[in-house]
Amino acid sequence: MEVKDVLTLAGLAISLGGLVISLVKLAQEQRKANELKQVENDAKARSERRTEYKLRIYQLLIDDRLTFDELVSRFREHTPTTEIDQLELRKCIYEMLVEGTLVTFEDKTYTADTMNEYDNEDEDDDG
């Protein structure tokens, strides 16, 4: 082999090495992007599930006062094929209590707070 051929092969080997390194780096970046997208999708799914739980809780408690266990069993009656995340349900109840959409009583029952500021303002205007 001549020196010229060796230099050409060395140049090709260096180019090939650079290409391999670039492809590995691209694959790592793509994996990180996919992981980030998965985290975002999980957060969105949790948010949607929490909103769905809050709506169901409000619907179940609009007419009744229920304990947590009764609420869980009503949830199961309405959606028997869906697994109920009780921790998520407790978080929803807590958020709704803080927001003022639920009211709790000494006997550990919950009910929907159907009175809001708008109802009180309308009553004041009439009288």
Image: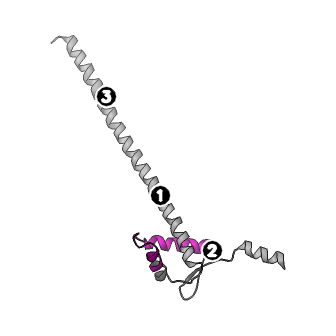
For image coordinates 43% across by 71% down, the residue present is 85
Residue mark closest to the camera, 1 vs 3: 1
Relative to the observer, which residue lies in front, 22 or 39? 39
Quick check: is 82 in the magenta stretch?
Answer: yes
Q: Which dot, 2 or 3, sits closer to the camera?
A: 2
Question: Circle 1: is it few (<14), some (14-19), or many (20+) Cα within 10 Å?
Answer: few
Residue drawn at (31%, 33%), measured in percent from left and top? 21
The numbered mark at residue 18 is 3
Residue 17 inside the magenta-drawn segment: no
Q: Secondary structure at mark 2?
A: loop
| As drawn, 23 above or below 5 | below
Image quadrant in which you'd find residue 125? bottom right
> Considering depth in this image, is 124 or 96 the residue closer to the camera?
124
Q: Which residues are magenta?
A: 73-101
Give the mark nearer the N terminus: 2 vs 1. Answer: 1
Residue of label 2:
100
* Mark sitting on residue 43: 1
